[in-house]
Image (cartoon, helix red, strand yellow):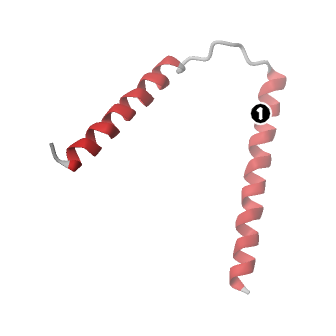
Amino acid sequence: MSFAHVIRSAFADNLERIREINRKYAAPRIEISPAVRVALLTLRIYLLVLVGLLVFKFYTIVAS
């Protein structure tokens, strides 16, 4: 058994486990209220703004 075969089979096993987990949790089990949806959307926007600020800060430091 070659080293490449061992690596390939390890990745295939892990990939199958990930697919199994994705199938299990594909449909949500709880109902999300509108307030929770708004809060999650706000958090998502906030995180995108933070990432944007990090990228901007990195660019200004590298550019100067």
Check disc 1 and report the residue beneath it.
40
Q: Position of residue 15 (x, y in %)?
A: 38, 34
Closest to the observer, 45 or 10: 10
Above or below 32: residue 42: below
Answer with the quarter of the image where residue 35 lies.
Answer: top right
- In what element is the residue under mark 1? helix
Q: Position of residue 33 (x, y in %)?
A: 79, 18
Above or below 5: residue 22: above
Q: Is residue 22 left or right of residue 41?
A: left
Above or below 54: residue 61: below
Closest to the observer, 24 or 37: 24
Type of the residue with mark 1? Leu
Q: Position of residue 64 (x, y in %)?
A: 74, 87
Q: Is residue 16 left or right of residue 25?
A: left
Q: Residue furthest bottom?
A: 64
Q: Position of residue 43 (x, y in %)?
A: 79, 40
Q: Is residue 3 left or right of residue 53?
A: left
Residue at image position (80%, 22%) is 34
